[in-house]
Amino acid sequence: MKMKQVFKDVVCSFCGCLCDNLEIEVENGEIRPLSKACTVSRSRFVNYNRDRVPYPMMKINGKHERVSLEESIKKAAEILRNADRPLIYGLSSTTCETQRKCVEIAEKTGGIIDQTATVCHAPTVVAFQETGEIHATLGEIKNRSDLVIFWGCNPLQAHLNHFVRYSVFPKGMYTEKGRKERYIVAVDVRETRTTKLADMFLKITPGKDFELLSVIRALVNGAKINAEEVAGVSMNKIKELVEKMKNCRYGVIFFGLGLTMSRGKHYNIIATLNLVRDLHKYTRFVVIPMRGHFNVKGAGMVLAWQTGYPYAVDFTRGYPRYNPGEYAAVNLLVNREVDAALIVASDPVATFPSPAAKYLTQIPTIVVDPKISMTSLTADVVIPCALAGIETEGTAYRMDGVPIRLKKLIEPKEGVLPDEEIMEKILKRI
Amino acid sequence: MKKLEAVLITGRTDKQGETLEIGKTSKEYFEHLSTVQMNQQDMSEINVKEGDTVKVETEYGSVAVKCKASREIDRGIIFMPYGPWTSLISPVDTEGISMPSFKGIKAKVYKASGERILTIQEIVEGYE
Amino acid sequence: MKSRMIIKNGYVYDPINKINGEKMDIYIENGKIVEEFTGNSTEIINAEGKTVMPGGVDIHSHIAGKLNSARVFRPEDHRTDPVPKTSVTRSGVGYSLPSTFVTGYRYSAMGYTTVFEPAVTPLEAKHAHEELIDTPMIDKGIFVCVGNNYFVLKYIKEGEYEKLKHFIAWLLKTVKGYSLKVVNPGGQETWKWGKNVNNLDDKVKGYDITPRDIVTNLTKVNEELNFPHTNHVHCNNLGSPGNYEVTLETMKAVEGIKPKKGRKNVLHIAHSQFNSYAGENWGNFSSGAAEIAEYLNKHGHITTCIGQVIFTNTTTITSDGPWQYRLYLLTKNKWAGADTELETSGGIVPYIFKKKNPVNTIQWAIGLELMLLTKEPWKVFIGTDHPNGGPFTFYPLIIAWLMSRKAREEMIQKVHKVVHSRTQLASIDREYSLFEVAVCTRAGTAKALGLSEKGHLGVGADADVAIYNLNPEKLDRGNYNEIIKAFSRAAYTIKDGEVVVKDGEVVKEVYGKTYWTNFQYTEDEELREDLEKVFRDYYTVSLSNFEVPLTYLPNNKPIKIEVK
């Protein structure tokens, strides 16, 4: 394609913010963001063609050899067909259309499907199931929130446009003065760019979130607490925050992996959700988890509507069963309970604890990914696919559950298919 | 040799996102991810300076990474970008809900001059 | 697949064509009902001794979209009802929150062929359509929530009626909706400030208009735009003692509105059971069904579905945010809520309807009273507001309660004694005929939805047919378990001329079409300017990305409507 083309309202397929207002220029196979893209988004577009899986590969005598797409799909289907209990894992960095096919593969092979939420917001899901969550779309925060709390998350490093588009700076319907209209609170174990920008920073002792949340909730519910400080935060400061919470118009807590991955995990989240619920005695308050990968929310959605359960779903008995801790990827790998794996749009070897990663390198593994990953380096079959949101379109769900359609900006290299089509081909062969 | 006792926090960074999009096998990704950020005084205590190689050791393993000074971190806390190098020392237990504790891990840090920092290819080979 | 089929010798109930149990043959060719034909290559279905009806049409059942959060929310619900895969069907889960595949299979097993999802918030319409793509066996469509939409409130406040009309036509076309839905008019917007509206003349926070303004304006717009279905309203004050008055007021408020050509009705009251309560508090709570039924009997401009209560563990999920909060306070069960920018606010609370609970008993009786005291089954339809009153899989039980006095009496023995003092159910003798059952489960609903090719078996109708193992000549109403069995497991369900269910089991998986209203209009420039401004300033998605492209309706059926 020689001509210069400009695309408007392009959706960035990197993080859960799914910014959909980018202007992108495409010329001679190069992609340049013209406006509004954050540094990560810029890197994604500019470098879209770097470090790609060059062609379909299979491990022959311990080395990756180039094979035809047909051969790679045949081998992938054979691995899955011959497995007693294959693990289908990943999903969060691809489209819902692909995710739907992945569920079908798991069902057809009597395997297990799990998605990357399993190692990031799984505690959020479990807490939601336990107690419920009062949620809002990001536009409500933009239009209404006068108190914004960031707990264990650092949007200025992980969701770079969040402040500008949704939570801190935008001028909305009832927040005409933007930043001036909002009181910003940050809770973290260390100083970050986010905490520096906050009006109030609560520096908390690592692992003490549950204590602090519980004390805040107790105070909201009228209890008297005899302590000078909790979790490294002075009681005066805590009381000041409680008053702000009770007296705001429409408060919000954004929380991230600082809560889900720390000691207490889902108990931290239950404490957060219950606090937000109890604040309804005084005002409106909502809570929004900061989801990482651009379509991790979608993976939970698709799994839920097809199987009833959002992650860690086992089809061994021909119907879906759900039990995190039993059917979740890390557990299955550490306990050596699966005998093959199909890894879609994620890199568990790079992110799972070493015993899980190690076992994954020892069982027959198929990777379908546009880019080289640690898992692809060791996989038995590697199938390249088109990049979602750049070379192929499809649906993704923003962190707040709003579905947005990704655009196709450029043709993939000849012979490189969208992963949806690859899954369909594998399915037909199983 | 002096070993510093610390609490390890792992997490994502913007730089990680940027270098990830360049590529997992890229120099940029390697240089950003295979690091540990520490408080300056903690660094002095174990006699290391910015750019030195240190070993981070937990109950689950140890890994050599480059040391970086951070003004944002209190003494007793260390930070590593979540990825291949942290997975070598992450806890395994998921406490019944699928997820290991990736934050708040008890760790020791000490000087490891001359220790080679593994590339991702070498980490994979080690697994295989 | 053979393109021709004859259903022979069944007892046919086709109320739209005034056929009441006549023994006759139905001819099908290329998915449509046709005149008699001769010749070979024909599939013969022997319906001797069986009841033949058009495929069931559900006017109000939450099957896609927001309810997905409830699926995530309630693993405990799914665990009671796992559904294994078969050689023709996908696996999934059932009970009150069935997975999409199972939703399709279970409707089809009951002889239903068309179902409408009645509460989709525009910003998340893609989601509802994505789920409908994965919902097999049935034709479908979505109702779009507009009763708390920013543009609607603003244009009513500003007296910009023409703009309101343009907006509605634009919105439905853009998100590929079929009809309008109003939930707690003004109440959700007010809930975003922590409050609610309690009657038709309360002020909506921030807008200086009332629920009455919202209902009447949207009903008028609906008729003037020639929507196939009327405005579809979930009234204010749902679930509260004394709320039958607000329901009466709502029905009265639209009395003078001129219906579109060819129909008398202008408003559908959704799940009226939840809005037919007398009494002032939970202590003296009683049935207001008689008052509602009396009004329906005297007036021709209203249809309603009942939202029948089933004694079971189910999930309440509505776009009525303040009501769900109230239900949480009442039950202290887990509560999920969600506000959608500029559009809606909803919630989820699990709920168990208990036989010995006096309020639940009265609720149960009210649904049946509405069905039995309203004379015309063309005005009042079976439903559970699935899953709010109970799962849709209980429809056969409701049919049994309507057809068999004995079935009702046996249940009356089991429920709380207030059924005698606070309702009049025990004194009602009426028993529905099969003809009337056919009206309130397919003919009436199809007519109210404005689907001319559904709900009947006349020439030109879609060949959606249900055949039940029920011999009207030998009908024994006392043996009502036979009625339940027959309607639970259709002998045959035929979809677009193909047998898809046999003996209550899905034998073929098919995917139906999605209806939507495709308004044809010249674009209003002022509206375009407003849209651009509001999307830029208040929404968090771009105007161009708000649209639901037809990719999301792989088998779409547009209803073309010219806007003058």
Image (tube, rainbow, N blue to C red):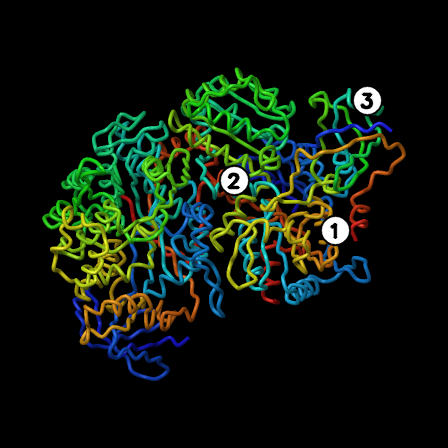
Residue A344's disc is none
Question: Which SS class for mark 2?
Answer: loop
Instruction: Say which of marks 3 and 2 sits in front.
Output: 3
- Residue to which mark 1 is pinned: A358
Single out the residue that lies furthest toward the top. A236
Q: Is residue B59 left or right of residue C20?
A: right
Callout 2–callout 1 Cβ contact below 8 Å: no
Chain letter belonging to callout 3: B
- Residue C470 percent location from the top left of the image: 25, 73
The amino acid sitting under disc 2 is Arg
Residue behind mark 2:
A398
C-alpha span from label 2 to label 1 = 33 Å
Q: Three-letter amino acid code at disc 1?
A: Lys
Spatial separation of the CA atoms under disc 3 and disc 1: 35 Å
Task: Identify the chain of the residue marked 1, using the numbered disc in the image.
Answer: A
Q: Which of the 4 quarters of the picture holds residue A190?
A: top right
| Residue at disc 1, secondary structure | helix
In this picture, is A337 found above or below A91? below
Residue at the image point whose x is 34% and y is 42% from the top: C145
Q: Earlier in the sequence, mark 2 or mark 1?
A: 1
